[in-house]
Image: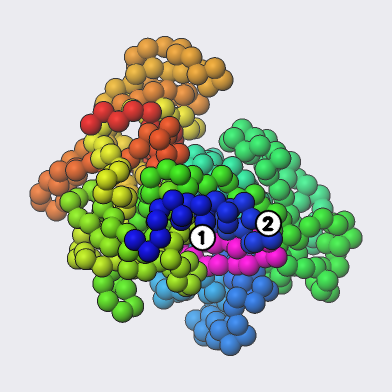
C-alpha cells in the first residue's frame, strides 16, 4: 500500500474540514421531458468556460444541418447520434463545473418516462437536485399533472436521499418574463415539495431563460431587462455555489456501486461510480460482488485528474487490473475482500407507498431498483403498516397497502426469464440503512411506474 489506510482517512478528514478549498458536490438535473434541462446545462457549461467556442460553433452547425437548431446547447451534453436526432436525453451525461467555492459534478438525467431507470441511476449518485421546469403556458401543467415527470422525479430523488433542491423556472422569455407566472409556479410547487419531504430551508427557486443565458451566470445583458424590473435575487451559479455538501462517511468500509463499465484507454477495464462509504487508494485489492472475482486498483481519476486516493461522496473512474472485464457489470459493487457487502436475495424494507391506483398485496410482482441495478422481485409478505410520525405499528399482517401508507414488507428476488431459459437470481449487494445509508435505499416499480420507496431494515438471506 502506498499509504496506510489511517493516513488516507486523516488526509480525507483534513480536506473535508479545510477552509478555502473548493468543496465537491454532485447534482442531478431533473424535470419533465423538454423542460430545457440539457439546453440549460449546455449554456451553463459555455458561460463558465467549460465548452469552447469551436465546439459551440460545431454544435450549432450540426444541429442546424438536421433541422434541430434549437437543440444546439443541448448537444454540449447529449453526445450520441440517437440523442441528437431524436432531440431527447436518453442516458446520463456527466460533466464538471467550477464555481468560486464548489467543484460540481453534474449528472444530466433523461426526462422521458421510458428512461426512468437511467434517471434513477443518476439520482443515486447525487447529493442535490436541480429541477428544471418549463414555465410556458400548459407545459408546466403537463409536467406537474399526475403522470408528469416533474412529480415523479422529485419523489424519486427524495426517496434516494437527496435533501436539497434548486428549482430553475425556465423559458420565462416565452411568457414575457411574467412575475405572476413565476409566482404561480412557485406557489404550486412549494406545498408539493414539503409534502414530498423537502425542507423549505433547503429549497431555492430561481427564474432563468436558458436559451439566451439569462440569470444563469449573470443578467447584465439586454435580454434580461424585463426580468431585472422585478427580480433582484441571486443567479443560478450564485445558488449552486452555496449548496451544502452532505456529511461524508469516510470511516465506514469502502463501497463503490458501479454505474458504468468501459474499456480502459490503454489496457484493462475501467468502471465509474460514486463512492458510497470509506476511502480507497491505488494498489488496493477489491472484491467485485456479486461473484468470486477480485481486482486491483491501477489508477483513480477524478474529473480526468489522476489521484492516489479518493473518499466517500466522490464520483470516480477506476482503472482496474488482474480482472477480466467480462466479470464487471453495471450494478456490481466494489468493496474490501475482508469486509464485503452482504448479498441479499430476501430482505425486509420499510416502504412509503406512492400515489398508486392498484394496491400492493402479498405476492405482487415488482422490480427492485438499487443504484444502477434493477431485478425482478415479489412482495412476499406484508408485515405491518406503520404510523409515519411515531414509527409505531398500526396493523399487523395487512391485506393490502394503499397510497400514502408506510409499511414493513418482505421482498424476495425472483428468477428472471432470459430468452428460453431461466436465470436464477444470485442476489443483490445490499446493506441495511443503519449500516450504510447509500447502500440501504431501494425503489420499487411496477408496470413502468414507481409505486414505493424505502430503506432496508433487515437482510434475511
Drawn side of residue 167 relative to residue 59, left or right: right
Q: What element carries label 2?
A: loop
Query: Residue 95, position in %: x, y?
Result: 52, 67
- 10 Å crowding of disc 1: few (<14), some (14-19), many (20+): many
Q: Mark 1 points at which residue?
A: 107
- What's the residue at 27%, 45% (across, down)? 338
Q: Is residue 107 magenta?
A: yes
Give the quarter of the image for residue 18: bottom right
Q: In which quarter of the image is the C terminus?
A: top left
Please report the bounds of the magenta region as a residue range: 90-113
Q: Which colour scheme is used?
A: rainbow
Q: Which of marks 1 and 2 is nearer the N terminus?
A: 2
Distance from Cα at disc 1 to Cα at disc 2: 26 Å
Mark number for residue 129? none
Query: Residue 375, position in %: x, y?
Result: 28, 44
Query: Residue 304, position in %: x, y?
Result: 47, 73
Question: Residue lying farthest right?
Answer: 229
Residue 169 visible in the snapshot? no
Q: In which quarter of the image is the N terminus?
A: bottom left
Q: Mark 2 points at which residue?
A: 19
Amino acid at each position: 500500500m502506498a499509504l496506510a489506510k489511517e493516513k488516507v482517512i486523516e488526509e480525507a478528514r483534513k480536506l473535508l474540514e479545510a477552509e478555502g478549498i473548493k468543496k465537491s458536490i454532485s447534482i442531478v438535473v431533473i424535470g419533465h421531458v423538454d423542460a430545457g434541462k440539457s439546453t440549460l446545462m449546455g449554456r451553463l457549461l459555455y458561460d463558465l468556460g467549460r465548452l469552447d467556442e469551436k465546439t459551440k460553433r460545431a454544435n450549432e452547425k450540426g444541429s442546424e444541418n438536421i433541422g434541430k437548431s434549437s437543440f444546439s446547447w443541448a448537444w454540449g451534453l447529449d453526445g450520441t447520434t440517437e440523442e441528437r436526432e431524436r432531440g431527447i436525453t436518453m442516458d446520463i451525461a456527466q460533466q464538471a463545473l467550477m464555481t468560486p467555492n464548489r467543484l460540481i459534478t453534474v449528472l444530466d438525467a433523461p426526462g422521458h418516462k421510458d428512461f426512468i431507470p437511467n434517471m434513477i441511476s443518476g439520482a443515486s449518485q447525487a447529493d442535490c437536485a436541480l429541477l428544471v421546469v418549463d414555465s410556458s403556458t400548459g407545459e408546466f401543467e403537463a409536467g406537474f399533472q399526475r403522470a408528469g415527470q416533474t412529480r415523479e422525479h422529485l419523489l424519486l430523488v427524495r426517496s434516494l436521499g437527496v435533501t436539497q433542491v434548486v428549482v430553475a423556472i425556465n423559458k420565462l422569455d416565452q411568457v414575457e418574463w411574467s412575475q405572476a407566472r413565476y409566482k404561480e409556479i412557485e406557489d404550486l410547487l412549494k406545498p408539493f415539495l414539503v409534502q414530498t419531504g423537502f425542507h423549505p430551508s433547503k429549497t431555492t427557486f430561481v427564474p432563468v431563460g436558458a436559451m439566451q443565458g439569462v440569470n444563469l451566470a449573470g443578467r447584465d445583458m439586454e435580454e434580461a431587462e424585463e426580468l431585472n424590473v422585478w427580480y433582484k435575487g441571486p443567479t443560478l451559479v450564485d445558488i449552486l455555489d452555496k449548496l451544502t455538501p452532505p456529511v461524508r462517511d469516510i470511516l465506514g468500509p469502502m463501497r463503490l456501486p458501479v454505474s458504468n463499465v468501459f474499456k480502459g484507454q490503454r489496457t484493462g477495464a475501467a468502471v465509474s461510480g460514486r463512492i458510497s462509504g470509506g476511502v480507497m487508494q491505488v494498489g488496493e485489492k477489491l472484491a467485485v460482488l456479486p461473484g468470486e472475482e477480485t481486482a486491483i486498483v491501477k489508477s483513480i481519476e477524478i474529473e480526468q485528474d489522476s489521484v492516489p486516493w479518493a473518499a466517500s461522496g466522490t464520483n470516480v473512474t477506476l482503472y482496474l487490473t488482474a480482472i477480466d472485464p467480462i466479470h464487471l457489470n453495471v450494478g456490481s459493487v466494489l468493496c474490501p475482500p475482508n469486509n464485503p457487502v452482504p448479498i441479499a436475495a430476501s430482505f425486509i424494507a420499510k416502504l412509503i407507498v406512492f400515489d398508486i391506483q392498484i394496491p400492493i398485496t402479498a405476492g405482487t410482482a415488482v422490480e427492485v431498483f438499487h443504484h444502477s441495478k434493477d431485478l425482478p422481485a415479489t412482495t412476499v409478505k406484508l408485515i405491518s403498516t406503520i404510523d409515519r410520525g411515531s414509527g409505531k405499528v398500526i396493523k399487523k399482517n395487512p391485506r393490502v397497502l394503499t397510497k400514502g401508507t408506510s409499511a414493513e414488507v418482505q421482498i424476495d428476488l425472483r428468477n428472471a426469464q432470459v430468452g428460453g431459459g431461466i436465470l436464477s437470481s444470485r442476489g443483490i449487494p445490499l446493506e441495511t440503512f443503519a449500516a450504510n445509508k447509500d447502500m440501504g435505499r431501494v425503489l420499487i416499480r411496477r408496470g413502468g411506474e414507481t409505486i414505493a420507496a424505502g430503506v432496508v431494515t433487515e437482510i434475511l438471506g
